[in-house]
Amino acid sequence: MARILITSALPYINGIKHLGNLAGSMLPADVYARFQRARGNETMFICATDEHGTPAELAAAAAGQDVFTYCEEQHRAQHDVARGFGLSFDWFGRSSSPQNHRLTQHFADVLEDNGLIEERTDRMIYSNADGRFLPDRYVEGICPVCAYPHARGDQCDNCGSLLDPIDLKDPYSVISGSRDLEVRETRHLYLLQTKLQDRIRAWVDSRENWPTLAKSIAYKHLDEGLIDRGITRDLAWGVPVTRDGAPRIGFEDKVFYVWFDAPIEYIAATEEWADEIGGNSGGWERWWRADKGADDVRYVEFMGKDNVAFHTVSFPATILGSEEPWKSVDMLKAFNWLNWYGQPFSTSKKRGVFMDKALEIAPPDDWRWYLTANSPEHSDSAFTWEQFQQAVNRDLADVLGNFVNRIIKFAETRFDGVVPAGGEPGPLEQKLHADVAAKIAELTEQMEAIEVRKSTQALRALWVLGNEYLQEAAPWTAIKTDRDRAAVVVRTGLNLVSLFARVSAPFIPFAAEKIAEAVGEPYPPSWPSLDAAKELSRLPEGRMIAAPPVLFAKIEDAQVTEWTERFAGAS
């Protein structure tokens, strides 16, 4: 049994996330986690809300709440909507947790002990109108690289460049809109990434199986030359800056930079799990420390391309620079963007469909199937209502739903609602066994390789095999003259239903559970072997079966028109 550690990019705390966040990290991570559990592997799937930094303070102020209360409410909201989509996190933590505070301060200490952190006098933007320094996202302006007019102080969303607020042209305060800004001196801690450049490059070189997208982003920043990064900010909300367990002199009004503490929360969230669920505070270390058992863990990370630089350069600098035996990522699965009618989905601009609203208009499996079948895996993909309708109607309703309904209804009508006995498989079943075995092998291979789109294509091809078999075997005709032959076909068809529940569960878990229940099979299911003859004779003869309610309601043109109008304002 393998041990698989899975993390998806931490959703930021400022409101419910959009479908782009779901498609580019959390959903494919969940599909992979469900697959690995079905394979019998010990699997730990970790996520958390990212709660520190300027956007949290700004969002709380806009909501008229203190930031602590705001983050508590938003964490619960994000947790609930994630569960609504069936995201099967083993733990959904909080970067504001005591565990993350402790670990962040620990890493800062050991990095400084190793000569990789130093105090520097920094030049930062100060707003006279606001009476405060403006770190990171408190400043916006024109990107010095691509001239995008709304670049943030930490990163340009248009070209992906990592920025410093003083780099921006024509900057203004996000708090007040004031351009009455000046550059003043302040003291901050810097992580000396320049000292780690060669080690980080060698580490990236050693990750041979990373997707091209992840590698290219990593090498872009390495080739441009790493810079030393400030890891503290003039903010009140965040992890306090300490040294050896005591407040650091001169840093009493500062906190660690959100991009320093947020990736550490992957580790801290696992400690949160151990403290709350695992029953002991040491259980998390076997996932994260090679000297405590993590040397046999395969660590897979899922994230959108805008987060890759931090996880291929900055966080590795923390891990490698600590000189401690922490587990680093083996596979970084990076995704492009799911676009909303030519523009990126955007939380800050309220552009696109958000997860809570999505669940109001369609079941979670509809979204899960569409977003995986159209995954922005190797290039950006475009969301359209028409494609969504087609994925639900043609794939789910017409192919899978139709097959399950036809064969079970026929068994209920002509075989008293039980798995029928009688007859022996013939040439048609032997051909089906070979075809099914090949498709299971293909699906398993694509799932192991984390090829999301190709996995959905292989799964749909399996569903199609069932429909083709049923059409050719025609039990409704055979039963008129040869009841035993009809029994073979129905028995085979019902076993296909069981198989489809098992292989579909990672993608459409709610429907898969109903399908498994219809034929009396356990849920969650195990992953099938490549022995198709065995897999298609699992159901015992005489077992009662019952047709499920409608699995997938078709999306009507009128609904598409309504949704197009309803969400037009967000385009």
Image (tube, helix red, strand yellow):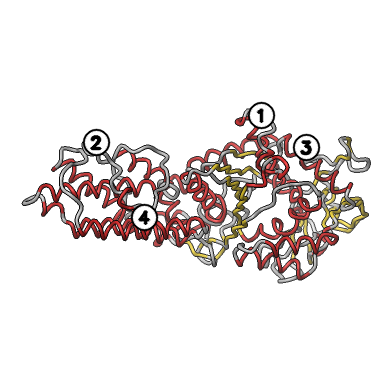
Q: Is residue 361 visible?
A: no
Regarding mark 4 in the picture, which secondary structure is present there? Answer: helix
Distance CA(mark 3)–CA(mark 2): 55 Å
Residue denoted by label 1: 280
Regarding mark 3 in the picture, which secondary structure is present there? Answer: helix
Q: Is residue 407 visible?
A: yes
Amino acid beneath label 4 = Val
Q: Which mark's residue is nearer the viewer, 3 or 1?
A: 1
373 and 341: which is toward the camera: 373
Q: Percent from the top left, x then y, of residue 207?
A: 66, 61
Answer yes or no: do the residues labelled 2 and 4 have beta carbons within 8 Å?
Answer: no
417 and 378: which is toward the camera: 417
For the point 44% across and 51% down, which residue is it? 367
Residue denoted by label 3: 102
Residue denoted by label 2: 543
Amino acid beneath label 2 = Arg
Instruction: Estimate how packed mark 2 is, as few (under 14), some (14 to 19) or many (20 or more) residues with alpha carbons within 10 Å.
Output: few
| Mark found first going from the N terminus, 3 or 2 | 3
Amino acid beneath label 3 = Arg
Instruction: Estimate how packed mark 1 is, as few (under 14), some (14 to 19) or many (20 or more) residues with alpha carbons within 10 Å.
Output: few
Answer yes or no: do the residues labelled 3 and 1 have beta carbons within 8 Å?
Answer: no
Image: 64 above or below 375 = above
| Mark found first going from the N terminus, 3 or 1 | 3
Answer yes or no: do the residues labelled 1 and 2 have beta carbons within 8 Å?
Answer: no
Distance CA(mark 1)–CA(mark 2): 43 Å
Q: Which mark's residue is nearer the viewer, 3 or 4?
A: 3
Q: What is the quadrant of residue 203 in the picture?
A: bottom right
Residue denoted by label 4: 392
Q: What is the quadrant of residue 156 in the picture?
A: bottom right
Residue 196, which numbered label? none
Distance CA(mark 3)–CA(mark 4): 46 Å
Q: Which mark's residue is nearer the viewer, 4 or 1?
A: 1
